[in-house]
Amino acid sequence: MASHEHSESACSKCPLVLPLTPAQKRRTKMSITELLDLRSRGVFDAATLATQNLKLMRSLVLQDNKNFIKVWSKTSKSPVRYELGKLYFENFQSCYSCIDSQPQVLYKLSKPSSKSEKIEDALLCQSPLENTLPSPSDHKPCLLTLTANSWLCRLSTETGEVIQKVYLSPDYKFRYLAWDLPQERFYVKSVLNKPTPLARQAGISQNTLLHFAIFHIFPLQIVGIMEINKTVFGNGVTEVNLSEGILAVSHNKSVKLYSFENLINKYMTNTLTLGEQSPCNGGGIVGNYPCGIPVNIQIKESLPVLFELQYGGDGMVEFGGFPWHYIHTPPQKKYKGTHHICSLADDTLAINGIQEMEGYSIESDAIYFHTDLSGRVLHFGPSNINMLKIRHELNSGLPCEVAEDFSITACRNNNATSTVTVTSSGRTVKRRFHQLDDDPAQETFRMLEYEDELDLLAVVAVTDEGGEGRASIRLHDNKSGELLRTIPLEEPWDETYQHELYFDRETLVHIEQKNNHFCCHVYKLHPNGTLMLYKASSQPLFQFPRPLPVDSGVI
């Protein structure tokens, strides 16, 4: 994202913003040269400029004479993470920027002196531009890290310098960071207390399951710490998450949803402020060592349940759509392998709401609400990707209808071998199906990534060539499903290992796990072997405002 200084200097050079002429408005398409000329003369306003920039980028990415070339590779013994143009290695100790023609080191932190200082989890935070915050440092993007010894730290994304530190607790083992409201409110979760075999044998039962610490991020302020226990939430709790103000408590084959806002309003005993004394803390400073942050949300009775659902399959429940719907697999055995799309208002099954991916495969299909906020549903399988839409007629009294928007099909050899064979003894044997849908000898879809700024679907398709897997990235239009371009990857794709793919404008990042190490490959868009968007000094010719990522709404 361009800095404020860059924007101000640009505005001072082009103080006059001219409107588009009627002839220009009537034209639906312009060449890249025309768009660049109009932009240089200040014809577009800020919002239109951002839109035109992304249209330019999409057009360049889809040109056949612009190739994605692997410019950089690196191996690591620890997992590699990619976030908004940055690569993190060695458990967040090393950070590389992917903005230049190839990744460059931004900073390297000193190695922790003990295992207690190890970073357990991290979140990348982007400050809001529309708010005035108390401190200048609050406006800068930061990496929020959680260490094994319960320190919550804000690090500069450019230097790795510690901006702020908060001590959580000496008593609870916090391990996980996640967003409740993206870029607004997050939570820190402790490990789930499970009874040891000796405790079970002795009949000892622990009431406390885990603890939640909830924070506002800009500026960093504590909301409170709460305890999840068996007295309030019952036995058999397997997972607890917080998303969009909804507390989701999973049990064996069921999930219950609670209003977190109502919970705070009713059960918060004291308001806490970081850096100030609190009676809940024995007079200690909130967020300082050794006291940390006290529990100030104390639930002592059963809570009203907003929504409860029994589920089967892998236990995944998705919420989304317009109007609100949820996707689940009922627990009954006859529904195994199917996905039911139901109204959240009255649990009514939508017309054509039972979705099933026909065929045979080793890995199961996946279904979820599309992250483009269109309310559509993506049903992903090894040979087909179905984009579904939910139709709703106002005041009709009828359930919503699930209809196909478009479908993407893998390129397969339809000349399958005969299903009937004759043995040497003359016995006829008939096979039940031609082949597996994820047969490595045929083109198989392995994963899908959505690039929201370019409005493109990136589908990883893998085929077998000479006994090894070869992957290509198929770029499809998000609105129509039309195949626009195919990008081959240089490295082989071993399906026995885990893979991750990130598509970020002109950058492709492929992370693969091989035995006990990880490999990271970075591809950049080049025309004829020369990097497209950068001068020799590695300074960008132009930059685009980057919107914040949107969570998929999975609970």
Image (spheres, helix red, strand yellow):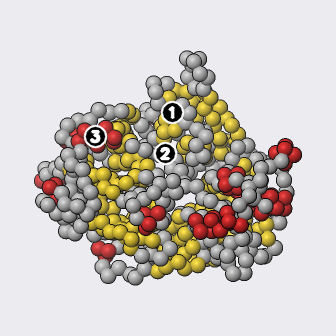
Which comes before the other along the chain, label 2 or label 1?
1
| Label 2 residue SS | loop
Q: Residue at x 74, y 55 (%)?
A: 17
Tag 2: amino acid: Gly
Q: Nearer the viewer, mark 3 or mark 1?
A: 3
The circle on residue 553 is 2
The residues bearing labels 2 and 1 have C-alpha atoms spaced at a distance of 12 Å
Q: Earlier in the sequence, mark 2 or mark 3?
A: 3
Q: Quadrant of the N terminus?
A: bottom right
Left/right placement of residue 273 relative to residue 335 reads: left
**Residue with the most extreme right position:** 23
- Looking at the rendered structure, the kind of residue marked 3 is Asn
- For image coordinates 56% across by 33% down, the residue present is 322
Q: Label 3 neighbourhood size at 10 Å, few (<14), some (14-19), many (20+)?
A: few
Q: Are marks 2 and 1 in contact (CB under 8 Å)?
A: no
Q: CA distance from mark 2 to mark 3?
A: 24 Å
Q: Residues within 10 Å of mark 2 (few under 14, many from 20)?
A: some
Q: Nearer the viewer, residue 86 or 501?
A: 86
Quadrant in which the C terminus appears: top left
For image coordinates 45% across by 57% down, the residue present is 132
Residue at image mark 3: 265
Q: Secondary structure beneath disc 3? A: helix
The answer to whether the residues at label 3 and label 1 have Cβ atoms under 8 Å apart is: no
Q: Amino acid at mark 1?
A: Trp
Q: Is residue 321 above or below residue 270?
A: above
Disc 1 is placed on an element classified as loop
Quarter of the image where one finds residue 281: bottom left
Q: Give the mark, 3 or 1, whose residue is nearer the N terminus.
A: 3
User: Mark 1 = which residue?
Assistant: 324
Residue at 32% in and 74% down: 117
